[in-house]
Image (cartoon, grey):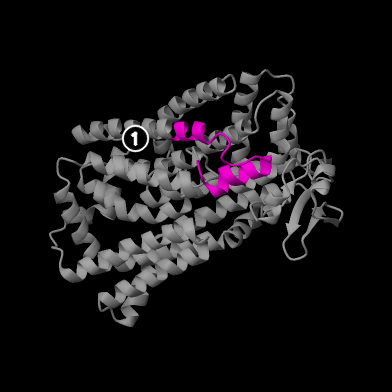
Amino acid sequence: MKKIKFPTAQTILLIIAALVAILTWLIPAGKYNSLAYNQETKTFSVISQEASTTLPATQQTLDDLEIKIPLEKFTSGDIWKPISIPNTFKELEAKPQGPIELILSPIKGIIEAADIIFLVLFIGGLIGIMNSTGAFEAGIAWLAETLKGREYWLIISVTFLISIGGTTFGLAEETIAFYPILIPIFLAAKYDAMVPLACIFLGSSVGSMCSTTNPFSVIIGSDAAGINWTTGLYFRLLMYTLCTAICIIYILRYAKRVKADPTKSVIYEERDTIENIFGSITHSTLKLNTRMRFMLFVFIMTFVVMVYGVSQLEWWFIEMTATFFVGAIIIGILARMKEDVFVDTFIKGANDLLGVAIIIGIARGITVIMNDGLISDTLLYYASGMTDGMNKGLFINAMFYIYAGLSFFIPSSSGMAVLTMPIMSPLADGVGLGRELIVNAYNYGQGLFAFINPTSLILATLAIVKVGYNKWLKFVMPLVIILLVFIMAMLTISVYI
């Protein structure tokens, strides 16, 4: 009997898109009114399906709309997206998404995700240029030799450093650049590709899940809940420390087992394919020379500049993309590449990540179907009514699961915050809890589900590493269960102390 092959990431996403389109025929359409602040006119706009109304930007306006958020959160720019207005949900005429809308959704998604798609393609171009110079190859050979006997420090340092980026400024999509760089290093250290995949993706995910100063989740979530982001900070720091330690120990145990016996690898069957793509570098006999060292320095500084720009200068995808482009040009000059060779090499490198870019666009298309079908707010409305009459412990865990479920349909952390917090955070008042606990439930719910959420970043990540979604689930589900139990226990304890 022929073995059934697990579908590709693109097919999985298209199946999900079809299922979401079917939901638009089954779930009633509905919408909350939203409130936006206009920095130029210093006024509020109340946006509904029928019209847009201008109101004075005063605390009285917010009180009249039952929005428990200080005015300065809007005027300072802390809240820059339209937020949902409580008690304004209305059922609307259904807008079911049919076959034509389903076909158009990936195209619309690719257009909407153009910023991150171009970032991915330019990262591919930079990697292509770097690989062609031989500097990357020689550098990895040198590092593999240097780390002999101490390879486990790679796991600890990479996971910890990336988790720091996740918890402080939301390092997520940017990590796509790290896989082609770090996978050969880990292969040279006699690990399988699952180890660097776990270090990078889980490091980013656990950091974002346990956000401490991340402006795209905990800060905007706290602002939208009407509280200071420092409220509950010590608990979040404790959770970050413990959850990150759990992830590192989990990866170390797996890595030790695979290094001792490669057949224990979850992706043992894919080893030849991965070795052909990434492994040739690990067998290099090239020696580092001075010019190669300069190229490696520029390459590393490209990422340092990117991280600094995102965390300190409010850079986003355009600036990050430009940084990688400039880095590629400088490396090309140092390598004394001819202009036509540079262009061809850059394009070939970008082409290597084209499949990843398309996956990102298809995933965004699912959100397009949700928004066009007007069911996102309906799901939020019914979810907010599920917690009536619950005790504290049950309530906070229910919120954790609600946010995990909603994140399948709303994978954006900032989008989730401005859409849900004005609706969900007042529910804490009714059971005598601080609103920071709703922010925590939001962080841990959508953060933990991101470990496996097919509408989030994982499928694009797996496409880079050439690992199937089924193999990832086999590797990560025990960890997800461990963290699930741990988080539920900690959330329950937090409401009684």
Question: Where 400 falls versus 42 (above or below)?
Answer: above
> Residue sitting at 30 percent across and 40 percent down?
156
Q: Quadrant of the N terminus?
A: top left
Q: Nearer the viewer, residue 471 or 255?
A: 255
Residue carrying label 1? 248
The answer to if 269 sits in the magenta stretch is: no
What is the residue that sits farthest to the bottom in this orientation? 339
Would residue 270 be seen by someone viewing this image from the given angle? no
Question: Where 176 falls versus 380 (above or below)?
Answer: below
Question: Where 123 falls versus 468 (above or below)?
Answer: below
The picture quadrant where one finds residue 191 is: top left
Would residue 245 be seen by someone viewing this image from the given angle? yes
Residue 172 position, x and y percent, is 47, 49
> Residue sitting at 45 percent across and 30 percent down?
480
Q: Nearer the viewer, residue 38 or 63?
A: 63
Left or right: 39, with 365 as reference point: right
The picture quadrant where one finds residue 390 is: top right
Residue 65 position, x and y percent, is 82, 43
Question: Where 239 falls versus 349 (above or below)?
Answer: above
Q: Secondary structure at mark 1?
A: helix
Left or right: 444, with 152 as reference point: right
Q: Magenta stretch?
A: 212-240
The picture quadrant where one finds residue 354 is: bottom left
Task: Check disc 1: other Cα within 10 Å, few if <14, some if 14-19, many if 20+.
Answer: many
Q: Nearer the viewer, residue 444 or 10?
A: 444
Q: Nearer the viewer, residue 490 or 332?
A: 490
Q: Amino acid at mark 1?
A: Ile
Total count of labels = 1
Mainly helix, strand or loop, the magenta region? helix
Q: Quadrant of the C terminus?
A: top right
